[in-house]
Each structure stands twice: as structure tokens, then as C-alpha cells.
Amino acid sequence: MKLNLFMTAITPGIALALMIYLFDRHDREPIRILLKVFIMGIISVVPAIIIENILSYFDVFAGIFGIAYTAFIVAGVTEEFIKREVVIKNVYFNPVFNEKLDGIVYCVISALGFATIENVMYVVFRFSDIESVGLYRAFLSVPAHMLFAITMGYYLSLAKFSADSEQSQFFFRKSLTVPAILHGTFDFILMSGIELLMILFIPFVIYLWITNLKKLNKYYNDSQNNYHDEFEG
């Protein structure tokens, strides 16, 4: 294993994880729990691979439909479900998950754990002879996992803190379906090789950044207001 490839693979995920940790400045989450979620995100790659291989076995579609099945079902639904399970099993019911921003923080940390080991698999092992893969994944694939996770955490927090059980279930479902659709769309555009869709790829990525930064900023402001209310109280 080349050390420089390994460092190239793990740096983006760790850097983004550190950024989201520092961003949560008013009610920062315990480092030990963040590390646990990150590590469980890494481990969750194993069941994800198993499920994806099983689903791929049942891919009976041809051409563009096969690509859509792989992008949306095999990758999108499976990976987002697994990453969400890490948060649900390890922190969703924990008292430290006490404000809406926490949903985004923990989902992002889980996703970046997943993305980091996935990046190692691609950069260090699968495409070790193609130097551009590490750069491409550092600027697109790993941040994309973070952006899908922001959407997931946004809806997961709405589910957790909703007073109405029916509404809570609605947002809980959206915490999987919306990031899965975004993930599937991202993969489908790249996998399809359709020129028109490739033209739309950059606008789609810009859309992901704009909408998810808005979600992140909304919950940051909520956290800030809660902090000031507690301090003044």
C-alpha cells in the first residue's frame, strides 16, 4: 500500500468531519460519541457491500434501466439506509442528541466514516494506477456523501423533535427517501454517460451545495438562538 495514496484517500473525509465538528460551536457533541459514529460508519461498509452484491444479483434490467437500478436502488437506497442506521442505533435515542443541528452533525459523521473507507477502497486498491481518481473523489464523491447526509440529518431531526407522531413518521421516511434520490441522481448522471445529463451534472452539484448549506445554516441559527436563550436565562 502506498502511503501517499492512503493519505490522499483519508484526508477529505477527516477534514470535512473536523469542519462539521468545529461548525457545531454552541453545543458541541462529545468527541468519544463522534468517534464511535465515525468508526461505525467505516464498519457499515461491510453490510452495505453484502446487500449491494445481493441486490446486484437481481439486476435483470438492460441498458439505462440497469444503470438506474444500480444508481438508485443498489447504491442510493442501500448506502443511505446503512448510514442512517448507524445514527439510529448509536445516537438517535441518546440524550446528547438534544437539538436539530445534532441530526446533521451525526449523519455527516456517519456518512464521512463510510465515505472514507470507500475512498480507500477506490483510491488505494481499485484505481491505484490512476492518480486523478483521488483528486476527483476528494472534490466530488466524498463531499457528495456529506451533502446527502445533511439532507438526511435535516429530516431526521424533524422526525425526532416533531410533537405529532404521524408527522414524525413522515419526516423519518423522508430522511431516507430524499438523500437516496439525491444519491441515485448523482450516480446515475455519472454512470449513464449521456451527454445531456453530464451537462446538467455541475448545476446539480451546485444545487446540492446551495440547498444543503441553507439547511445547515437554518439549524445553526436555531442552535445559536437556543444557546443565547439558555445563557440569558
Image (cartoon, rainbow, N blue to C red):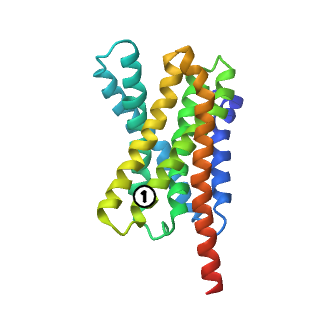
Q: What quarter of the picture does the N terminus occupy?
A: top right
Residue 74 versus residue 183: which sits nearer the camera?
183
Q: Crowding at label 1, few (<14), some or many (≥20) Cα neighbours within 10 Å?
A: some
Q: Is residue 188 above or below residue 16?
A: above
**Which residue shows up at 43% across the image and 41% down it?**
80
Left-right relation of 232 to 191 = right
Q: Splitting the image into 4 quarters, where does residue 171 fall?
A: bottom left
Q: What quarter of the picture does the C terminus occupy?
A: bottom right
> Which x, y percent locates residue 230?
60, 81
**Secondary element type, mark 1:** helix
Left-right relation of 73 to 19 = left
Q: Is residue 129 visible?
A: yes
**Which residue shows up at 40% across the image and 32% down it?**
49
List the residue tagged with mark 1: 90
> Which x, y percent locates residue 213?
62, 49
Q: How many marks?
A: 1
**Which residue shows up at 58% across the image and 47% down it?**
212
Q: Is residue 194 above or below residue 83?
A: above
> Which x, y percent locates residue 18?
66, 52
Q: Looking at this view, name the residue that lies furthest to the bottom.
A: 233
Q: Splitting the image into 4 quarters, where does residue 184 fall?
A: top left
Q: Looking at this view, name the residue that lies furthest to the right.
A: 4
Residue 16 versus residue 197: which sits nearer the camera?
197
Left-right relation of 80 to 21 = left
> Which x, y percent locates residue 148?
51, 43
Q: Is residue 2 visible?
A: no
**Which residue shows up at 29% across the image and 61% down it?**
166
Residue 111 versus residue 222: which sits nearer the camera?
222
Q: Amino acid at mark 1?
A: Asn
Q: Splitting the image into 4 quarters, where does residue 141 fall?
A: top right
